Image (tube, rainbow, N blue to C red):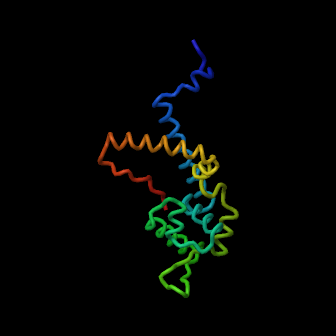
């Protein structure tokens, strides 16, 4: 009889072992986001938005949404909350009043400076740290998995899990 620490048992791949890893990833991301909110007073997604605006002041809402892989209306609602809390400033350009540029207020920069890391969240940061080849392999395998799900259930809509704002 083999022990649980046997390398053969640890590396055995089954549908359940893969599922368990998905659960660990999701739970880790959720716990980190909850911890961030408790520590900083903003959600994990809001903190990520602040980080993006620190790195690229003057983004438009659509550009921010693209950087965070969000629907534009989700990003807009999140920015409205951050503006209400005095962390983000919306400015219209003089050339085209329809264009709204986003920047951090002093309070937004201060909050970000004392907030937990990584500001983007543990899962986005871990994915960002993978090399391009590993990202491509992972995306290809996940696309294959999504294709299998689509074949099993046509009616679920392939919608991503929403961020909490």
Counting from the top left corner in percent of width and height, residue 104 is at 62, 73
Residue positioned 60% across, 44% down in the render: 133
Residue positioned 44% across, 52% down in the render: 161
Please determine whether, in this image, residue 73 is positioned above or below residue 143.
below
Counting from the top left corner in percent of width and height, residue 28 is at 56, 45
Outermost residue to the bottom: 94
User: Relative to residue 117, is residue 25 drawn left or right?
Assistant: left
| The one of 75 and 153 positioned closer to us in this rendering | 153
Counting from the top left corner in percent of width and height, residue 95 is at 54, 87
Residue positioned 56% across, 58% down in the render: 44
Looking at the rendered image, the quarter that the N terminus falls into is top right
Please determine whether, in this image, residue 15 is positioned above or below residue 143.
above
Outermost residue to the top: 1
| The one of 54 and 45 positioned closer to us in this rendering | 54
Q: Where, by quadrant of the figure, is residue 89 drawn?
A: bottom right
Residue positioned 41% across, 44% down in the render: 146
């Amino acid at each position: 009889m083999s022990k649980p620490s046997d390398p053969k048992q640890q590396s055995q791949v089954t549908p359940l072992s893969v599922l368990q890893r998905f659960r660990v990833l999701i739970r880790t991301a959720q716990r980190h986001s909850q911890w961030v909110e408790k520590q900083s007073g903003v959600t994990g997604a809001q903190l990520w938005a602040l980080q993006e605006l620190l790195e690229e002041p003057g983004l438009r809402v659509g550009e921010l949404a693209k950087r965070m892989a969000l629907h534009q209306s989700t990003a807009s609602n999140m920015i409205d909350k951050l503006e209400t809390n005095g962390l983000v400033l919306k400015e219209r350009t003089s050339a085209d009043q329809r264009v709204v540029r986003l920047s951090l207020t002093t309070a937004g920069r201060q909050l970000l400076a004392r907030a937990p890391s990584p500001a983007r969240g543990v899962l986005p940061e871990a994915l960002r740290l993978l090399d391009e080849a590993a990202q491509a392999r992972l995306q290809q395998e996940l696309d294959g998995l999504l294709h299998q799900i689509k074949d099993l259930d046509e009616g679920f809509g392939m919608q991503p899990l929403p961020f909490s704002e």
